[in-house]
Image (cartoon, rainbow, N blue to C red):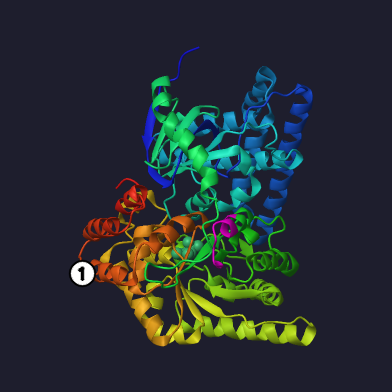
Amino acid sequence: MAVKREKEFLGSGVSPGVVFGQALKLDNRNRAILKMRVDDVEEEIRRLLNAIEQSKAQLAVLKSRLEEKIGSEHSVILDTHILILEDQTLRNEILDGIRKERANSEWAVTRAMKRIVRAYESLEDEYFREKHNDIEDVMERVLLNLSGDRPFSWDNLPGDLILVSRDFHPSAFATMDLQKVRGLVLELGGRTSHTAIISRGLRLPAVMGIRDILPSITTGDALIVNGDDGQVILNPTQKRMQRMRGRIEAFGTTASYVLEKSGQTTLTRDGTAVSLRANTELPYELEAAKRCGAEGIGLFRSELLFFGHPQGLPSVEEQCSSYRELVREMKPHTVAIRTLDAGSEKVFDGEDYSGQDNSAMGLRGIRLSLKAKDMFRSQIEAILRSSSDGNIEIVLPMVSTVEEIWQAKSLISEVRESLRENSDLELRKVPVGAMIEVPAAVFSLEVLAKEVDFLCVGTNDLIQYMLAVDRENPHVAYLFQPLHPTVLHCLARIADVAANLKTPARICGEISSNPFYAVLLLGMGYTQLSMNPLSIPAIRRVLHEVSIDDSRRIAEKALTFVTAHEVCRYLTDAVSKLVKTDLAYYAREIAAPNGKS
Ligand code: PEP
Ligand code: MG
């Protein structure tokens, strides 16, 4: 057998660590298409033909609905789709795949689809080139109907998988067997994308933003994922393996070390208390938060409760049971539940809010909650009910006007009143906070801060909006600069206004997880930082070595520079001189916050 050539790819290392494993390629919907041997070929063919008939019947219903609404001339497109399903050449190609290879229908359909799509894409004529979308639509429908009768199972997969895909929706984490996944490689995405944030929480080395890696990779290929340096090696040679073995083994053994308890409180060298809290999203992270000594959950991202839900929306009871578990487990600390920060992905309250081209600036966060009021009420009710079990807070995401806070508070009061009248639960006071992540919120902070009990500074979005840099777009990743002087002046302003108005302010973005930023934030006046739970021990260790005066001096000086590069050079040097802890990894991270620049 021919030896496969080694090939190296570079992207952004967004979650550290070095791992070795075998590729599992995922399709656009994050499904694995695997070639599996079938025992009964005739039964497999019946399965395929059923799925095709089912698809045709669905298209016929869609067609008649469309005709009722807009007339028959527009439904021709669906006739084309039905004709594709009846095309004998295509059907024979798929049947051949099943018969000759004794393979599963999903694999045979995908193989035929890819071949035709490639053929269309190579055409000169743009009109015909676009036609591959029709083929893909129809075949996706067949695949969906196939998945209904035999849901995808992780049971027979090996335990050293590296997921390779174009994009990866965070909700897919909820449906996979994480014990079997060692690393993640994506063509899209950046360091502050939710998928990257979750990868770090799971200690899953990840490299993102590698353009065009998919065509070079086949499921089963050997891969090294080097999340420290943003490097992926396909078919590593023996020599390479020998060179990397040390780092692969070292990563394997540190995995348990990071979960060691690291004490429960944080004091600076001169005895100032700093509260280090955890950002969580997946159930696994609650355990990590407790073991790493988190002083509460500073931000619970509630999206996965909604996105991972089989019926669409979780009931009040289902939400309550998740929030109650967090509150009980974190006692006596506080748990901040951020209300749904969805973008355009879903249908809520029966209304279809999908299809927004620019969803980061569209109907997301509090804007969506104030439209889909029934859904918002149910989330508020679940949070208020859970308050009888411990300390809980509400955080409103994407606030850009004070009216949004007024409306949300008025809805919260209504729900509270109704609960008081209709239940005998002992409801505690539930503080309400606002995420500060939109420039408008920074510059109207004097008004907003008076309306809430606390502020959560969402630096991931704040940097995105302040610098006009899409946090998911690898093409502009080099401009996503947390140390950009404008960002630093915004953060200093927020700390000053919050201190004058005596409104507590907590940093919740990814920058809290890096000791260099943590020292800078402390110097600006922030004494509450919320972060990936696994970062808490390192931040705690470094803050023990720094005094408030040191950090103030550093922050004051950092605010005098005019480029992120200058700030970075100064900060790396100043903090490294103060602390004994080895900060080399973190220094690389602040020098290239989104991987290679
Ligand atoms: C942020 O924007 O910094 C934040 C904490 O929220 P998210 O990353 O979920 O948008
Ligand atoms: Mg945000």
Q: Nearer the viewer, residue 160 or 78?
A: 160
Q: Residue at x 64, y 61 (%)?
A: 306
Q: Is mark 1 within 8 Å of ligand 1?
A: no
Q: Tag 1's secondary structure? A: loop
Q: Residue at x 71, y 55 (%)?
A: 310
Q: Is residue 406 above or below residue 62?
A: below
Q: Nearer the viewer, residue 350 or 33?
A: 33
Q: Amino acid at mark 1?
A: Thr
Q: Is residue 363 above or below residue 284?
A: below
Q: Which residues are magenta?
A: 288-298
Q: Nearer the viewer, residue 426 or 583?
A: 583
Q: Is residue 32 part of the magenta span, yes or no? A: no
Binning the other alpha carbons within 10 Å of mark 1 as few (below 14), some (14 to 19) or many (20 upward) gives few
- Disc 1 target residue: 560
Q: Nearer the viewer, residue 287 or 540?
A: 540
Q: Which image quarter: residue 497?
A: bottom left
Is 408 left or right of 145, judged from the image as shown?
A: left
Is 523 left or right of 393, judged from the image as shown?
A: left
* Residue 196 % position (x, y): 48, 51
Q: Can residue 338 be seen? A: no
